Amino acid sequence: MSNEEFNKIFIEYYNKLCAFAYHYIQNREATEDVVQDVFCHLIERHQEIRQESLSTFLFQCTRNKAFDYLKNAHNQQETIDGFQEPSELDMFFDNMIINRPEVEYDYQVLLDAVRS
């Protein structure tokens, strides 16, 4: 694919793909990232795509990448939520260690050594 062909495709489809992806993602920056990935994918696979199916390829790829983004964002949020609320076991171990005077003393000695 020549630069001229790519530019023509980019100009014709960029805004359409952004609007399509935004419908799913509802975040401008993420939408632009997804569409950028679509165009990178197009460059990588341009030899496999027939001209008559280009539009279908671009929109299907955009939809799939938008779904991937949403799935990853959801998984990251679950991970973040999991870290924000410590489990009972975490609190138990924290309390065990913090409430032991010898550990507190060792911790303070270590802190003083690091600071000096």
Image (cartoon, rainbow, N blue to C red):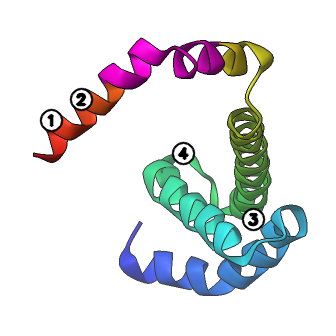
Query: For the residue labelled by badge 3, is the local secondary structure a helix, a strand or a loop?
Result: helix
Q: Nearer the viewer, residue 7 or 34?
A: 34
Q: Earlier in the sequence, mark 2 or mark 3?
A: 3
Give the residue type at disc 1. Answer: Ala
Residue 24 on image: x %, y %: 87, 61
Eye-nearest disc, 3 or 1: 1
Disc 1 vs disc 4: which is toward the camera? 1
For this orientation, the residue located farthest to the left is 116
Quadrant containing the N terminus is bottom left
**Left/right of residue 35 with respect to residue 36 in the rendered view:** right
Find the distance from the CA under tag 2 to the CA under tag 4. 61 Å
The residue indicated by pointer 3 is 55
State the SS at label 4.
helix
Gap between marks 3 and 1, in whole Å? 65 Å
Return the residue at label 2. Answer: 110
Tell me residue 89's x, y (percent): 72, 12
Whole-percent x, y for residue 6 in the image? 48, 75
> How many angstroms separate mark 2 from mark 3 (CA)?
63 Å
Q: Is residue 42 above or below residue 7?
A: above
Residue 45 relative to residue 50: left or right: left
Q: Earlier in the sequence, mark 1 or mark 4?
A: 4
Q: Which mark is residue 48?
A: 4
Quick check: is 12 in the magenta stretch?
A: no
Q: CA distance from mark 3 to mark 4?
A: 14 Å
**Left or right of 26 on screen, residue 69:** left
